[in-house]
Amino acid sequence: MTGVSAGLLARAWGLHDFGRPEAALEEFDRVLAREPDNTEALRGRGLALCALDRYEEALDSFQRLLALDPDNPTAHGSAACVLLQLGRADEALHAANAMLQRQPDHPLGHTAAALAMAARYQRGGPDAPLMQANTRIAVAKAQELGPQSPEIWHYSGVALGLIGDTAGMDAALEKALSLDPQHEDSLFQLALSHAAKRRLRPALRLVESLLAINPRAAHAPHLIVAACGTAVRRLPLASLAAVVAAALAHLLEANLDVGLAWLRIAVGGVLAVAAVGPTAQLLGVPEAS
């Protein structure tokens, strides 16, 4: 590797770690224009493309990397994660197993395998019970090997949720948040879980935590709708109209941060409910113990 390429590569990783995947991608591409077989640049390019939700292109980068270094366990694991995003569970499981053949005690390999088997369970078929059982085994192994990793606990929770174990999912997500209280994905998933179980106030508290960390969280509106959905469906038409009017007023307010706007809409909706009367309906929503 030339000195120029090394400098570009260092700059690319710096941009990637700073949360600027588009800029990082440009730098990785500049390295690859000089050295098409640079495996580190191919890995970085794939990760930057994943951050931009460009999964087909990311998969191409990881496949090019594997063509150059077929025994690279991280590349197999990355390919497995991308294949899961593309809905190709069988190929994802194959890639995860390829990673585990080369690095049997890597917790991310077991996590990727668990997610792939959970996806196959959801597909149904005669092997669904086996996939469900094997998902639990893979999750337990991943948690054993990575007990201090919030990512491992988060994806363990996702896998358990996919096979219908909502209690196990919630416990894993809460463990992830105990290790990293600012883990946005775990806040998001746990809020959705509470909302699905009609636990309105815990769900909204998690939304508030998410917005405190990232006021522009793209999924915050979805969480608020999910958390308030049950209560809103029980309101009179006038109350619903008041909520909509409050939402429009806040969205049209100039220079208002998007995350704060949605939080204020949620608060305005609750106040509208109180003004019209059926506050008791909100208080009757089952709470988390």
Image (tube, rainbow, N blue to C red):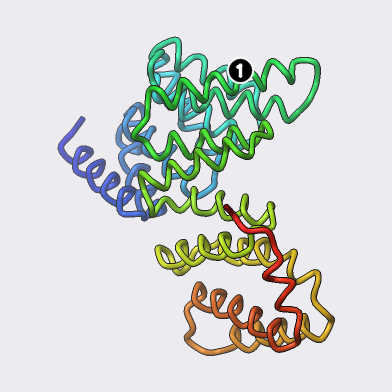
Pointer 1 residue: 134
Tell me how many marks there are: 1
The answer to which of 122 and 101 lies nearer the viewer is 122
Indicate the quadrant containing the N terminus: top left, top right, bottom left or bottom right: top left
Q: Residue at x 63, y 63 (%)?
A: 200
**Residue 17 coordinates in the image, percent (x, y):** 31, 48
The answer to which of 253 and 269 lies nearer the viewer is 269
Q: Residue at x 40, y 19 (%)?
A: 73
| Residue type pointed to by label 1 | Asn
The answer to which of 221 and 44 lies nearer the viewer is 221
Count neighbours of disc 1 (C-alpha within 10 A) and say few if under 14, some if 14 to 19, many if 20 or more.
some
Q: Residue at x 26, y 49 (%)?
A: 14
Q: Is residue 129 above or below residue 49?
A: above
**Residue 181 coordinates in the image, percent (x, y):** 38, 52
Q: Residue at x 26, y 41 (%)?
A: 9
**Residue 263 coordinates in the image, percent (x, y):** 54, 75
Residue furthest out toward the left:
3
Quadrant housing residue 116: top right
Q: Is residue 12 above or below residue 99?
A: below
Q: Is residue 120 above or below residue 277?
A: above
**Residue 215 coordinates in the image, percent (x, y):** 45, 69
Residue furthest out toward the top:
101
Q: Is residue 212 above or below residue 287?
A: below
- Circle 1 SS class: helix
- Viewed as shown, does residue 124 lie left or right of 87? right
